[in-house]
Amino acid sequence: MNKTSTDILIVGAGPAGLAAAAAAANSGGTVTLIDENPRAGGQIWRAELGKIRSPAASKFLRALTQGRVDLINSATVFAFSGDNTLTAQTPGGSISISCGKMILAAGARERFLPFPGWTLPGVFGAGGLQALVKGGLSIENKRIVVAGSGPLLLAVADYLKTHGATVLVIAEQASAAKIRRFARGLWRQPEKMVQAAALRARLIGIPYKPDTWITRCRGPRVSKRLARELEVTIKSRGSSRVIECDYVACGFHLVPNLELPMLLGCQIRDGSVSVGDHQQTSVRDVYCAGELTGIAGIESSLIEGEIAGLAASGQTEKAKTLIKKRDAATGFGRALDHTFALRPELKHLVEDDTLICRCEDVSYAQVKDFATFREAKLQTRCGMGPCQGRVCGPAVEYLLGWEPASVRPPIFPVKMKYL
Amino acid sequence: MHKIKVNGREVRVGEGTTLAAAILASGDPFRTSVRGEARAPLCGIGICFECRVTVNGQPHVRSCTVLAEDGMEIVTGE
């Protein structure tokens, strides 16, 4: 195992991690930024065919190349030891990094809800399909249903359309009344208002349907090749219709990647990491920034990252000047949570034979009578596969009201020889 | 351009293409589930493990997290 040490270790090279690195790099200490992907940028600035296209991201990435920050790509953190040391798996072997201060900026993932047919090939996450297209998947002339919840659906629909797909509909489960209130509230953040107006203009011709969700997806049962065509049933205010399409892009807003903060023992409240004014967590010398502290979008992630980077590198006076701006940005997150909260009808999409755990093929009937995630894990292997409950966990918390399962190392599957 | 093999067949992909995108283009399923269902990627970002395949003999590689490089041999459907 390769061992190194650094003054400040930042996990996650998305907007929050990059902003933290840039802020901390001015302090004179050593800064190490570690990320799981082949390129920095996180999901929102994910490289397209190997290149980062956002000008905002390029500014941060230039700061990295000026040599003040040590960036380690393709490294998946899987363990923590008490002396402020993280261990990660890389293509070249495992590395262990000890640090003075740690900033967690591990971001978020999509929340997936099971419905009949959600395991069919061709049914992707919304951000999931976008990521695959950024990785070179052609969607030219594909007919796509975008569904689920949250502002990501609009950004994804725009991206898919720009890349040659026909987006048949955007099915948003949130109510029309909530969406209207949310849109009216955007004046508080003029830059978001401008973004929303531009997005709306680009999406002309694509029906945006609130109060609407997928109830079922069917595809030809073929074992040798992927499905060519999907039949999606969409429900809207009592009436249902079937749409034929090539792909489904469906995700229900986002959930923070809490595995690492939970492993470190950080206090979690209402599904996100609790932090103080300077982004400090309940664990000494550990800070947290970005979507881990609540899904609030990129402006919030950038400012939280900057505060964490400043505070962790001893620039607390400078960090203090940003707190008011941060609080305004995180307010947007609360509006998102309220607007895109899941409606109760979505709990009834699952049927007895609908798979809940895709890794271990565990059905709803097998888990529905258990009182806790732990019991279901022990009896059915639900959540025990390689994703370790990252997909089914948020789903069963919503469907069955279970508490999140406890986290144990390794938090990602690793080769035996690295343990 | 990179030339890779997916289940023995040659697939040509551009610079910066992930293995997941290359395999989707090939039309082959990614993995076979415990009950024998064909699966393909869900999350696209290394979370769900539905896209795992064997790369150059190494099993359980998340194909959405790896960029295609000349000569890679991919086996899917396991």
Image (spheres, coloured by chain):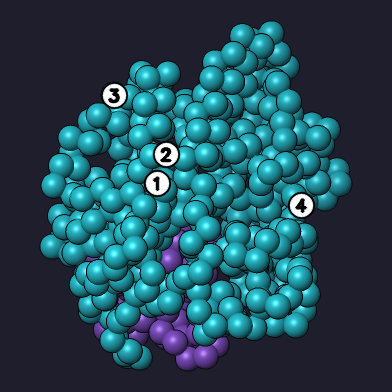
Chain colours: A cyan, B purple
| Residue highlighted by disc 2 | A178
Residue located 55% across and 44% down the image: A107
**In the rendered structure, are the residues bearing label 3 and label 2 in contact, judged by CB atoms less than 8 Å apart?**
no
Q: How far apart are the alpha carbons under marks 1 and 3?
A: 23 Å
Amino acid at pointer 2: Lys
Distance from Cα at disc 1 to Cα at disc 2: 5 Å
First of labels 4, 3 by sequence position: 3
Q: Is residue A3 visible?
A: no
Q: Is residue A204 visible?
A: yes
Residue under disc 4 on the same chain as residue under disc 2: yes
**Quadrant placement of the C terminus of chain A:** bottom right
Q: Secondary structure at mark 4?
A: helix
In the displayed structure, would residue A293 be above or below residue B52?
Answer: above
Amino acid type, residue under disc 3 in the picture: Val
Point 82% across, 36% down: residue: A283
Contact (Cβ within 8 Å) of mark 1 with mark 2: yes
Q: Which residue is mark 3?
A: A194
Q: Are marks 4 and 3 in contact (CB under 8 Å)?
A: no
Residue type beneath disc 4: Leu
Q: Residue at the front extreme? A: A238
Q: Residue at x 54, y 26 (%)?
A: A331
Give the mark nearer the N terminus: 4 vs 2. 2
Q: Earlier in the sequence, mark 1 or mark 3?
A: 1
- Determine the secondary structure under disc 3: helix
| Structural crowding at the residue carrying mark 3, measured as other residues with C-alpha within 10 Å and reported as few (<14), some (14–19) or many (≥20) | few
Q: Which residue is mark 1?
A: A175
The residue where tag 4 is placed is A263
